Amino acid sequence: MRCPFCGNIDTQVKDSRPAEDHVSIRRRRFCPACGGRFTTYERVQLRDLVVIKSSGKREDFDRTKLERSIRIAMQKRPIEPERIDQMISGIVRRLESLGDTDIPSKVIGEIVMESLARIDTVAYVRFASVYKNFQAADDFDKFVSELRPSVIPTEE
């Protein structure tokens, strides 16, 4: 692992333990060249995933890009960061278990929306507004009205 301070590639692991999410390993490292200490996290990657964009363009799956978009949707919501991390890990595991390494971006978006809908409806609407490319307030209104349970008027 390359030292982030001096660039030395010969660093030493001083301590390893499971991270709080129990999905990754936290390693404390030491650089003998500059004396710097830093932490790395390692995750198991079952397979290399490739995202097929709607334009047909292919790009490597980037967990940090997925995480960034979910955290933006969850910004200032009362959800613990650990719960968000668990959701992201669950989404990645689900993508890896689909059986195919080529995954359309539409499938990823649908899985993310499904996961967000179970945790927080505001984050779900935020993510959907970008994913479905809302252009006007009417788009929000239509989408939110589909979320509301239909109320059947009762006769009295």
Image (spheres, grey):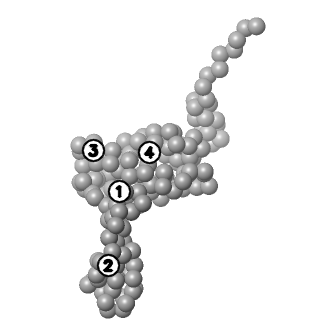
Question: Which circle's residue, 4 or 3, is located before the other in the chain?
Answer: 3
Task: Count residues near mark 3 (Cα–Cα under 10 Å), then give few for <14, some for 14-19, many for 20+.
Answer: few
2 and 3 marks in contact (CB < 8 Å): no
Question: Which circle's residue, 4 or 2, is located before the other in the chain?
Answer: 2
Question: Which circle's residue, 1 or 4, is located before the other in the chain?
Answer: 1
Which structural element holds mark 2? Answer: strand
Task: Report how far apart the C-alphas of labels 2 and 1 lie in the structure.
Answer: 20 Å
4 and 3 marks in contact (CB < 8 Å): no
Count of numbered marks: 4
Position of the C terminus by quadrant: top right
* Mark sitting on residue 14: 2
2 and 1 marks in contact (CB < 8 Å): no
Task: Report how far apart the C-alphas of labels 3 and 1 lie in the structure.
Answer: 16 Å
Identify residue for label 3. Answer: 97
Identify residue for label 4. Answer: 112
Q: How far across and down, in percent of the image, does residue 77 sit?
A: 60, 51
Q: Quadrant of residue 147?
A: top right
Q: Is residue 82 above or below residue 137?
A: below
Task: Count residues near mark 1 (Cα–Cα under 10 Å), then give few for <14, some for 14-19, many for 20+.
Answer: some
Circle 2: residue type: Lys
Which structural element holds mark 4? Answer: helix
